[in-house]
Amino acid sequence: MNGISSYGAYLGSQYDNTTYGQRTNSTKQTQAVKDKDEVKLSDKAKNLLKELRQSYGNVDFMVASYNTDEEADAYLSKGTKDFSVLIDPEELEKMANDEKTRQKNLGVIDEAMGKLSDMKDKLGDKKDEVTRFGVSIDKNGTVSFFAELEKLSEKQKERIESSKENKEEGGYVQSPRIKRTKVTASSVDGLFDKINNVDWSKIKEEKPEPDRNRFNFSI
């Protein structure tokens, strides 16, 4: 597959039937995305990006410069698929021009997707709290792992059921409030531990935001 790992194609077919909850972002994160300049890539890097997107069927590949975990989270949260991969343009250019760098990062992506998929099974009931997994590779080749989580309290679940009954009777339907958080780690094992140790009692409920127009990271 022109140097792209065949495992990526396998992943695409494996993940096609997996769905997660609706994703939204804070105003601050959205503004961080808006403030970024449009990414310009060489033809070789554009071709590589195209190959990646074709090979990994259910992974969103994004290319953008970022300096903090918060900025990376803002980009990763804009994905529309189950998994998101954010690559700094400098690193993508290196991959396009250096076979060793390319294979190294493809190996990282393959391993990450496999481990993140396995992690879902190990999380048990907590897997339903995860709405998105992401991987970022910065301009130095440093890899970070990301997960978005959301949760409804039992009280909110009861309210939703009550709202459904009211709707059937032609009454008012209450908009539920939900808890959301994000965790970042330098390894999949570290991400697993952070997901398991989320203390939902310390996270405030918020009102779900309507879908915003997603930014286009296509090159």
Image (cartoon, helix red, strand yellow):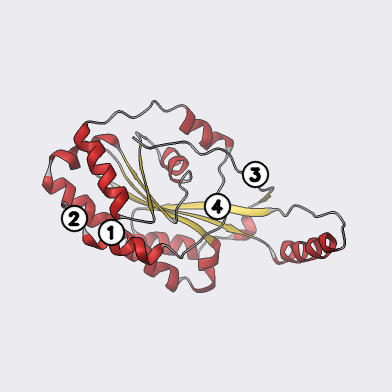
Mark 1 residue type: Gly
- Left-right relation of 154 to 199: right
Q: Nearer the viewer, residue 6 or 141?
A: 6
For the residues bearing labels 2 and 1, Cβ distance under 8 angstroms: yes
The residue carrying mark 3 is: 209
Residue at the (50%, 74%) spot, across then down: 124
Task: Give the quadrant of residue 89.
Answer: top left
Mark 3 residue type: Glu
* Mark carried by residue 8: 1
Nearer-N-terminus badge (2/3): 2
For the residues bearing labels 1 and 3, Cβ distance under 8 angstroms: no
Nearer-N-terminus badge (2/1): 2
Q: Is residue 38 above or below residue 174?
A: above
Q: Quadrant of the N terminus?
A: bottom left
Q: Of the residues tagged 4 and 3, which is closer to the observer?
A: 3
* Mark carried by residue 181: 4
